[in-house]
C-alpha cells in the first residue's frame, strides 16, 4: 500500500472513531446534565473572571448539538461514552445544589470543576460521595458555606482538591487531620480562606506525593511542622496571613524542588539560614510581615531563577547585601520596614542591575541622602515606594521620565523644593504620595492632566497658592483619594460647574482655611471618609450636608472648628454606616445627638453641650471610644451604660457636672483600658466591679466627692499604669498589700488632697516594679492608634489619616499644674501631698530608681530626709514641704543631676544647704520656713549659725493647716482669687518625656 493510501486509511479511521464518539452519549447522563442546567440560572454577577461566559447556553437536546459529549465543558470517555469530565468554570451559574440533584448521577466523573460560580451560600451536598472515581475536584470561589462534608473524605482517588476562596466554609468536623489521613493520594491541596482554626497536623509531613499546598488565611495556629518544607515533591507552599502560626525555616537541601514559598503575614521567626541559597528552582519568596531577624544572608544572591522577593515588615538588621544584585531575573523586590543600619541611598546602586524590575519597595529602611540617580536605569519600573526614610533635596526632574510609573510614593521624608511640573509625563500614574515632606510652592496644574490618577496625597507640606477644587477635579474622573490637609493653601470651593466625581471616597481638607462646607460635597455620593478639621467653619451644619452620603459615610472629622449645632435639630445623626465621628473643640450647644448603631468612636469633647446623657446612647452596641469630656452634662450616669461593657475600651466623661454614685455595672467591662470620670460631682464608693477590668491601664476619678478607703483591691489589675484619686474624701490607713505583686505596672499614682492617715505605704513601694526601671527601652506613649491606611502595591501601607487618641495627665508641682498631653513610658510619679500621713519617709522608696516626681508635701511626716533618696537619679521634682522633717538636707541629693524643682520649705531642717550642681539653681523659696538652715541661697552664713535646742510650740501645727484656715476665712468673706501660673519647666519636662 502506498503512502497516500495509508494516509487516506488513517484519516478514514479517525473520522469513523470521531463519529463513534459523537454517538456514544448516554441518555441518562444527557438528561442529568440538562436537568442540572435547568436547576440554575444565568447571572453575570456570579463569576468574576473577565473571560467568563455561559457555557451551558450552548447545550441543546435536539439537532446536531443534541449529543452531550459535544457540549461545552463536557468530556466523554472515548470508548464507553461515559461523561468523565465536567468543566463549568466561570459560567455565570447561580443557584443552589442539593443531594437530590441529577448531577450526582454522573458516577463516572473523574474531573469536575464548578469554580468561579455562585451557589448562594448552600452547603456542599453529601451526594458528592457518588463521584467515587474523581481525581480532580475544583470548587474554588463558589460561595459554598458550612462544614466540608465528610463524604469528600471518601473520594479516595482524589489527587487535586481545590476548595479555596470560600470564606464561609469550614473544615473542623471532619478536621484537616482527618482529610490528610483519608486522602492519601493528594498531590494538590488548596484550602485557602477555609476556616480550619487548628494546628497543622504532623501527619502532613508523610504526604510525600504532595506538590502544591495552599493554606492561606485559614486561622491556623500552633507551630508549623518544619519537615513539610522537606517533602520530596513539594513545589508550591503558601500559609500566608495566618498570624497565629509560628515556625522557623529549616536547613534546605539542594535536591528540594521548591519553586514558590509564601509565608507572609505569619509569626514565623528566627534567621534565614544560609542554606536557602541551595533552592535553585525558587522563583518566588514571600516572608513579608513576619518576625524574622538577623542579617539577610548573602546566599540569597545565588537564587538565579528568583523573580519575586518580598522581605518587608520584619526585624532584619545590618545592611542589604550587595550580592542581591546578582538576581538578574528579579521583577519585584520589597525590603521595606526593617531595622537596617543607616545607609546612603547611593550605596544601593546594585539595585540598578535589575533592569527587569517593575516593583521596588524600599520604604522605611533608614535611607539618607538625595533620591539616587541609579533609579534612571530601571526603565521598566511601575511601582516605586521610598517613603518613611530621611531623603533630602528636591524631587529630581529625571524621575518624571519614568513614564511607566503607576505608583510613586515618597511620603514622610525631608524632600524640599517644588513639585516638578513635568509630572505630566507620568501619564500612567495612578498613585502619587508626597505627604509629610517640606515641599513648597504651588501645586502644579500639570497634575490635573494625569487622567488615570486615583490617589493624590499632598498633606503636611508647605504648599501654597490658590487651588480651584472643582477645576482640579474636573479631569480626574478616576480619583478616589484626595488629601490636601495641613498646607498653606487657599481653596476655591464655590462654582457653578457640575462635577460628577463618581469614585472619590476619601477627601482630606483639614487646615485649609475653609470657612464653609465645600460645594463639591453635593456630588460625592460614594464618600466614605471626610476630614474638614482645623478650619474656620462657623455656624450650623447645613441641612443639605446631613442628607449627603447618607449610605456611604464611614468617618467624619469636623473637630477644631467654630460649629454651633445643626440647621435642624435631629435626635439621631442620619448616616447609616458611620463608624467614627469627631466633633471635638467646637461650640456645639444643647443636648447630645445620637449617632447610628454602627458607631465605634464618638468624640464630642470641649463643647457646650448640656442636659443629661440620653439613654438611647446605650443602644450603640459597637461603641469602643466615648469622649464627652469638657462639656456641661449633668445628672446621674445612666445605668444602661453597662450595655457597652463588652465593646467599650475608652470612656472619658471628665469635667462635667455628673452627680450621684458611679453605677457598679458601668465599670465592669473586660475591654476597658481608659476610664476618666474626674472633675465631676460623683459621690459614695469606688465600685468594686472595677476589679473585672483586667485590661485597664488608666483610671482617673480625681476631683470628685468620693468617700471610701484606699482601693487596695485594684492592685490585682495586671495592666494598670496610672491611678489618680486626688481631691476626694478618701480616708483611713493604707494597709500593707497582701502579696508582693500589687500594682505590678503602676507608673503614676496621685492620692493628694484626701484624708489618708498612718505611715506611708512602704510595702507598696517595694512592689511597684515599673518605677524601678531607670531607663525604659525606647520612647512610647500611652495612646490608642486609629489609623486609616491605604494598601498599595505589595502590602505597602500608606497612612492617609492618623488619629492617635492619647492619654493625658495633670501633675501639680510647686503650685503649678503641669498638663502632660501625652504620657510617655518614661513618666513616673508618686503624689501623696495634702493628706495626714505621719512617721518617717521609708527607705524603700529609694528603690524606685525610675521615679521622676515625688511629692509628699503638706503632711505630718517627721524624722530625717533619707540620704538614700540620692539614688533616685531620674528624679526631676522633689517636694517635701510643709511637714515636720528634721536634721540636715543629705548632701547625696546633689547627685540627682536632673532635679529641676526642689522644695523642703516649712520643716524643721537644720545645717548647711548642699552646694553645687543642681542645688545652685534653687531659690530661697525652696528653703523658707526652716530657721535652722544656712548657706546659699539663704543670706544666713553657716559660720555664725547655732542650731536651736528646741522648737516653738506653734510649729507643731503644720503650716499648711494655717494656710488652709486663711483660705477658708477668705472664702467665707466672699473673696475668690484665681491664679494661673506657667513656667519653662513644664515645657522642658514635657518635651523630654
Image (spheres, rainbow, N blue to C red):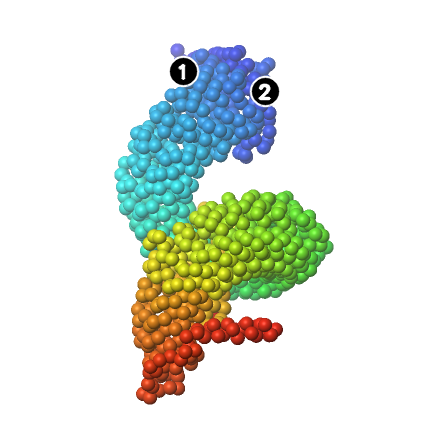
Relative to 697, 53 lies left or right: right
- Identity of the residue drawn at 58% across and 72% down: 971
Front residue (pair 939, 330): 939
Q: Position of residue 957 (x, y in %)?
A: 44, 74
Front residue (pair 788, 867): 867
Residue tagged by mark 2?
38
Front residue (pair 514, 812): 812
Label 1's element?
helix
Q: Which mark is residue 589?
A: none
| Residue 849 in view | no
- Identity of the residue drawn at 34% across and 32% down: 201
Q: Quadrant of the N terminus?
A: top left
Residue 805 drawn above or below residue 197: below
Q: Position of residue 275 (x, y in %)?
A: 27, 43
Residue with the most extreme front position = 953
Q: Position of residue 673 (x, y in %)?
A: 47, 51
Label 2's element?
helix
Could you give the CA–CA distance between mark 1 and mark 2, rounded to whole angstroms? 51 Å
- Identity of the residue drawn at 44% across and 19% down: 129
Residue 39 drawn above or below residue 557: above
Q: Which mark is residue 3?
A: 1
Q: Quadrant of the C terminus?
A: bottom left
Residue 477 drawn above or below residue 902: above
Residue 324 drawn above or below residue 654: above
Q: Position of residue 598 (x, y in %)?
A: 58, 44
| Residue 686 in view | yes
Amino acid at each position: 500500500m502506498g503512502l497516500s493510501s495509508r494516509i487516506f486509511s488513517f484519516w478514514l479511521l479517525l473520522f469513523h472513531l470521531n463519529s463513534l464518539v459523537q454517538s456514544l452519549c448516554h441518555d441518562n447522563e444527557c438528561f442529568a446534565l440538562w436537568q442540572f442546567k435547568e436547576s440554575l440560572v444565568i447571572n453575570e454577577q456570579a463569576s468574576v473572571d473577565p473571560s467568563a461566559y455561559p457555557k451551558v447556553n450552548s447545550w441543546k437536546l435536539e439537532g446536531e448539538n443534541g449529543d452531550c459529549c459535544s457540549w461545552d465543558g463536557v468530556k466523554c470517555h472515548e470508548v464507553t461514552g461515559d461523561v468523565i469530565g465536567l468543566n463549568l468554570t466561570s459560567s455565570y451559574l447561580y443557584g443552589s445544589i442539593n443531594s437530590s440533584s441529577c448531577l450526582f448521577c454522573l458516577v463516572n466523573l473523574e474531573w469536575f470543576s464548578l469554580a468561579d460560580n455562585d451557589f448562594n451560600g448552600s452547603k456542599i451536598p453529601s451526594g458528592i460521595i457518588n463521584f467515587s472515581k474523581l481525581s480532580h475536584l475544583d470548587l474554588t470561589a463558589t460561595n459554598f458555606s458550612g462544614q466540608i462534608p465528610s463524604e469528600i473524605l471518601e473520594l479516595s482517588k482524589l489527587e487535586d482538591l481545590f476548595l479555596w476562596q470560600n470564606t464561609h466554609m469550614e473544615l473542623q468536623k471532619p478536621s484537616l487531620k482527618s482529610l490528610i489521613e483519608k486522602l492519601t493520594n493528594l498531590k494538590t491541596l488548596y484550602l485557602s480562606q477555609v476556616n480550619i482554626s487548628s494546628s497543622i497536623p504532623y501527619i502532613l509531613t508523610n504526604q510525600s506525593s504532595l506538590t502544591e499546598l495552599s493554606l492561606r488565611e485559614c486561622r491556623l495556629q500552633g507551630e508549623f511542622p518544619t519537615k513539610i518544607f522537606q517533602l520530596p515533591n513539594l513545589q508550591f507552599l503558601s500559609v500566608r496571613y495566618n498570624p497565629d502560626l509560628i515556625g522557623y525555616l529549616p536547613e534546605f537541601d539542594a535536591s528540594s524542588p521548591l519553586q514558590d514559598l509564601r509565608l507572609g503575614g505569619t509569626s514565623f521567626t528566627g534567621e534565614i539560614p544560609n542554606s536557602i541559597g541551595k533552592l535553585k528552582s525558587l522563583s518566588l519568596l514571600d516572608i513579608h510581615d513576619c518576625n524574622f531577624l538577623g542579617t539577610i544572608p548573602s546566599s540569597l544572591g545565588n537564587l538565579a531563577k528568583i523573580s519575586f522577593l518580598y522581605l518587608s515588615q520584619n526585624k532584619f538588621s545590618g545592611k542589604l547585601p550587595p550580592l542581591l544584585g546578582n538576581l538578574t531575573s528579579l521583577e519585584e523586590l520589597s525590603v521595606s520596614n526593617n531595622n537596617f543600619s543607616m545607609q546612603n541611598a547611593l550605596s544601593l546602586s546594585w539595585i540598578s542591575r535589575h533592569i527587569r524590575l517593575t516593583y521596588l519597595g524600599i520604604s522605611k529602611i533608614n535611607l539618607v541622602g538625595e533620591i539616587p540617580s541609579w533609579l534612571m536605569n530601571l526603565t521598566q519600573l511601575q511601582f516605586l515606594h521610598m517613603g518613611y526614610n530621611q531623603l533630602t533635596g528636591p524631587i529630581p526632574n529625571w524621575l518624571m521620565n519614568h513614564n511607566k510609573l503607576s505608583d510613586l510614593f515618597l511620603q514622610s521624608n525631608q524632600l524640599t523644593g517644588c513639585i516638578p511640573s513635568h509630572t505630566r509625563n507620568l501619564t500612567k500614574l495612578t498613585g502619587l504620595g508626597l505627604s509629610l515632606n517640606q515641599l513648597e510652592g504651588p501645586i502644579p496644574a500639570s497634575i490635573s492632566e494625569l487622567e488615570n490618577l486615583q490617589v493624590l496625597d499632598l498633606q503636611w507640606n508647605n504648599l501654597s497658592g490658590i487651588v480651584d477644587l472643582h477645576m482640579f477635579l474636573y479631569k480626574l474622573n478616576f480619583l478616589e483619594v484626595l488629601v490636601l490637609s495641613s498646607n498653606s493653601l487657599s481653596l476655591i470651593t464655590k462654582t457653578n460647574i457640575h462635577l460628577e466625581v463618581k469614585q472619590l471616597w476619601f477627601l482630606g481638607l483639614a487646615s485649609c482655611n475653609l470657612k464653609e462646607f465645600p460645594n463639591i460635597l453635593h456630588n460625592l455620593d460614594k464618600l466614605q471618609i471626610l476630614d474638614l478639621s482645623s478650619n474656620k467653619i462657623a455656624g450650623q451644619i447645613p441641612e443639605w450636608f446631613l442628607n449627603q452620603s447618607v449610605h456611604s459615610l464611614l468617618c467624619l472629622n469636623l473637630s477644631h472648628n467654630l460649629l454651633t449645632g445643626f440647621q435642624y435639630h435631629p435626635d439621631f445623626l442620619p448616616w447609616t454606616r458611620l463608624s467614627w465621628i469627631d466633633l471635638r473643640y467646637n461650640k456645639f450647644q444643647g443636648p447630645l445627638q445620637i449617632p447610628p448603631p454602627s458607631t465605634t468612636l464618638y468624640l464630642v469633647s470641649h463643647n457646650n453641650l448640656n442636659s443629661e446623657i440620653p439613654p438611647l446612647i446605650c443602644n450603640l452596641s459597637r461603641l469602643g471610644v466615648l469622649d464627652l469630656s469638657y462639656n456641661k452634662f449633668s445628672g446621674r450616669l445612666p445605668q444602661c451604660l453597662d450595655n457597652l461593657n463588652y465593646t467599650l475600651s475608652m470612656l472619658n466623661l471628665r469635667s462635667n457636672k455628673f452627680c450621684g454614685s458611679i453605677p457598679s455595672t458601668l465599670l465592669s467591662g473586660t475591654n476597658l483600658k481608659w476610664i476618666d470620670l474626674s472633675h465631676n460631682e460623683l459621690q459614695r464608693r469606688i465600685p468594686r466591679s472595677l476589679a473585672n477590668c483586667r485590661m485597664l491601664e488608666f483610671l482617673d476619678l480625681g476631683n470628685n466627692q468620693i468617700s471610701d478607703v484606699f482601693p487596695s483591691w485594684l492592685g490585682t489589675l495586671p495592666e494598670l499604669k496610672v491611678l489618680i484619686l486626688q481631691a476626694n474624701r478618701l480616708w483611713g490607713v493604707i494597709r500593707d498589700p497582701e502579696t508582693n505583686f500589687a500594682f505590678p505596672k503602676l507608673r503614676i499614682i496621685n492620692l493628694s488632697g484626701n484624708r489618708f492617715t498612718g505611715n506611708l505605704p512602704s510595702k507598696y513601694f517595694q512592689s511597684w516594679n515599673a518605677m524601678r526601671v531607670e531607663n525604659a527601652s525606647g520612647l512610647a506613649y500611652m495612646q490608642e492608634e486609629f489609623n486609616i491606611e491605604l494598601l498599595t502595591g505589595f502590602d505597602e501601607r500608606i497612612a492617609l489619616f492618623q488619629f492617635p487618641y492619647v492619654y493625658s495627665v495633670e501633675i501639680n508641682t510647686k503650685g503649678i499644674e503641669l498638663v502632660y498631653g501625652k504620657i510617655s513610658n518614661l513618666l513616673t510619679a508618686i503624689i501623696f501631698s495634702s493628706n495626714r500621713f505621719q512617721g518617717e519617709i521609708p527607705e524603700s522608696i529609694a528603690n524606685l530608681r525610675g521615679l521622676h516626681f515625688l511629692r509628699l508635701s503638706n503632711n505630718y511626716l517627721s524624722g530625717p530626709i533619707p540620704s538614700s533618696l540620692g539614688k533616685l537619679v531620674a528624679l526631676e521634682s522633689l517636694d517635701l514641704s510643709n511637714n515636720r522633717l528634721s536634721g540636715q538636707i543629705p548632701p547625696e541629693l546633689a547627685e540627682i543631676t536632673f532635679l529641676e524643682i526642689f522644695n523642703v520649705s516649712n520643716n524643721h531642717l537644720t545645717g548647711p544647704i548642699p552646694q553645687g550642681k543642681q542645688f545652685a539653681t534653687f531659690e530661697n523659696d525652696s528653703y523658707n520656713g526652716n530657721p535652722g538652715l544656712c548657706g546659699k541661697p539663704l543670706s544666713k552664713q553657716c559660720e555664725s549659725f547655732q542650731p536651736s535646742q528646741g522648737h516653738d510650740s506653734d510649729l507643731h501645727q503644720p503650716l499648711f493647716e494655717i494656710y488652709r484656715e486663711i483660705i477658708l476665712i477668705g472664702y467665707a468673706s466672699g473673696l475668690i482669687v484665681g491664679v494661673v501660673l506657667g513656667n519653662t519647666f513644664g515645657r522642658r519636662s514635657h518635651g523630654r518625656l
